[in-house]
Amino acid sequence: QKEVEQNSGPLSVPEGAIASLNCTYSDRGSQSFFWYRQYSGKSPELIMSIYSNGDKEDGRFTAQLNKASQYVSLLIRDSQPSDSATYLCAVNRDSGYALNFGKGTSLLVTP
Amino acid sequence: GAVVSQHPSRVICKSGTSVKIECRSLDFQATTMFWYRQFPKQSLMLMATSNEGSKATYEQGVEKDKFLINHASLTLSTLTVTSAHPEDSSFYICSAWEASGADTQYFGPGTRLTVL
């Protein structure tokens, strides 16, 4: 069973701080990595995708990938209370398009 | 971005009845759709992969005779939960893969199923 592991949290950060979310995965064949945000009772919303080692920045979000360490992270700069949600790490399965999800990290940004 | 809809958004049914959930890609063609299930405080678990014009591929432990999937067109996949029981109560979410090759899945808004 291919695994995607995340710290469940909750991770609490003050407004304006940097939130750092981490994820490890077990399938070395994975090529595509995604971060989704999920609000309670809602479906996941894509935040970032990353496919190559290194950093990828999009606005306040930066995804980091290290395939050798099988590690992917998400940094959220200038965190806002509206960023409070569960962040799901997802990794493609079996070189295909279906995704394995981690259990998610709950983020709480306090005013 | 691309839009995927699901209907109904919420359904409550009695034990033993069947429930059909529709997943539609509204502005793109999806040769492949996925059905996920999410129990409270848990992550999304893939149930099955739905391919247009062919039989669905089910994940280990998912009963294909209980969860019937039909992907009759490039824009519609349906999931029917047959003889639903309280343990089938969950949040069912579909996603669609755009046929043009964009490496992105688009998720539907989900269907909350409660079986009494």
Image (cartoon, coloured by chain):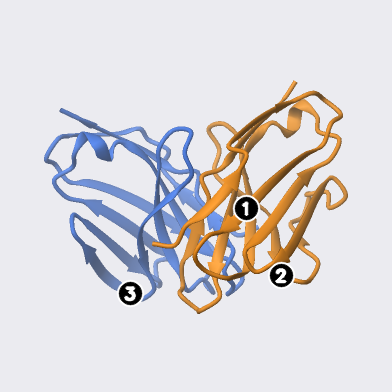
Chain colours: A blue, B orange
Q: CA distance from mark 3 to mark 1?
A: 34 Å
- Amino acid, disc 3: Asn
Which residue extends farthest front? Answer: B27
In the image, which is nearer the foreground, mark 3 or mark 1? 1
Residue shown at the point (61%, 35%) measured from the top left: B39
Q: Which mark is residue B52?
A: 2
Above-or-below relation of B107 to A93: above
Is circle 1 on the same chain as circle 2? yes
Q: The disc numbered 2 marks a residue on which chain? A: B
Which residue extends farthest bottom? Answer: B100
Q: Quadrant of the N terminus of chain B?
A: bottom left
Q: Which mark is residue A53?
A: 3
Residue B17, percent from left and from top: 84, 31
- Amino acid, disc 1: Cys
SS category of the residue bearing label 3: loop
Above-or-below relation of A1 to B40: below
Q: Earlier in the sequence, mark 1 or mark 2?
A: 1
Residue B40, percent from left and from top: 57, 31
Visible residue check, residue A111: yes
Visible residue check, residue A27: no
Q: CA distance from mark 3 to mark 2?
A: 34 Å
Q: Which mark is residue B23?
A: 1
Of the pair A9 and A93, the residue shown nearer to us: A93
Residue B67, percent from left and from top: 79, 47
Q: The disc numbered 1 marks a residue on which chain? A: B
